[in-house]
Image (tube, helix red, strand yellow):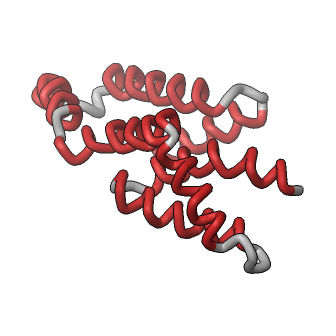
Amino acid sequence: MPPLMFTALIVVMLLGFPVAFSLSALGLGFFFYGVHAGFFNDAFMGNVWLRMFGTLSNELLLAIPFFTLMGAILERCGLAEDLLEGTGQLFGKVPGGLGFAVIVVGAILGAITGTVAASVIAMGLISLPVKIGRA
C-alpha cells in the first residue's frame, strides 16, 4: 500500500495540485480505502480518537506554538529590534558588522525563546528591512 500511495502522490503533484491538498486528500482517501478493504480492525478504529487526544495533549508538542508566539511578541514589542540596534552599534566599524550583529541577536533570541523557529521568525522580520536599507 505505501508504494501505491507514493505513486499516487507523485501523479497528483505532477497534475499540479497544491502540496497541502494533495497530502490531505490522499491521506483521507487511502484511510477510507484501508477501512473498506479491511486493513484496520475495529479495536484499532476505536482507539484512534484516544491516540489523537493523547498527541494533542502532549506538553512537549504544546510548547512549539507558544515558542513561535514568543518570537512574534518579541518582534512586535520592539525588544528584538532594540537588541539588533545595540549589537549593530557594537559591531558597527567591523566589516560585515551587520551580519555579526544578526548572528549574535539570533543566538540571544534563540536562548530567550527556546526554539530556532521563533528566532528565525523574529530575525527575519527585523533584520531584512535593515539589510535592504543598508544595501
Image point (71%, 66%), residue name:
98
Q: Is residue 30 above or below residue 106?
A: above
Image point (84%, 55%), residue name:
134
**Residue 99 at x, y = what percent?**
69, 68
**Residue 4 at x, y = what percent?**
55, 41
Q: Nearer the viewer, residue 62 or 123?
A: 123
Q: Nearer the viewer, residue 70 or 13?
A: 70
Using the rendered view, name the quadrant where residue 59 is placed: top left
Asked if residue 8 can be seen in this view, the reply is yes
Left or right? Give the position of 42 relative to 5: left
Image point (35%, 44%), residue name:
67
Asked if residue 1 can be seen in this view, the reply is no
Left or right? Give the position of 121 relative to 116: right
Q: Is residue 104 above or below residue 68?
A: below
Q: Is residue 120 above or below residue 101?
A: above
Left or right? Give the position of 96 relative to 109: right
**Residue 116 at x, y = what percent?**
45, 57
Q: Nearer the viewer, residue 63 or 95?
A: 95
Q: Nearer the viewer, residue 41 or 98?
A: 98
Q: Is residue 18 above or below residue 68?
A: above
**Residue 36 at x, y = what percent?**
34, 20
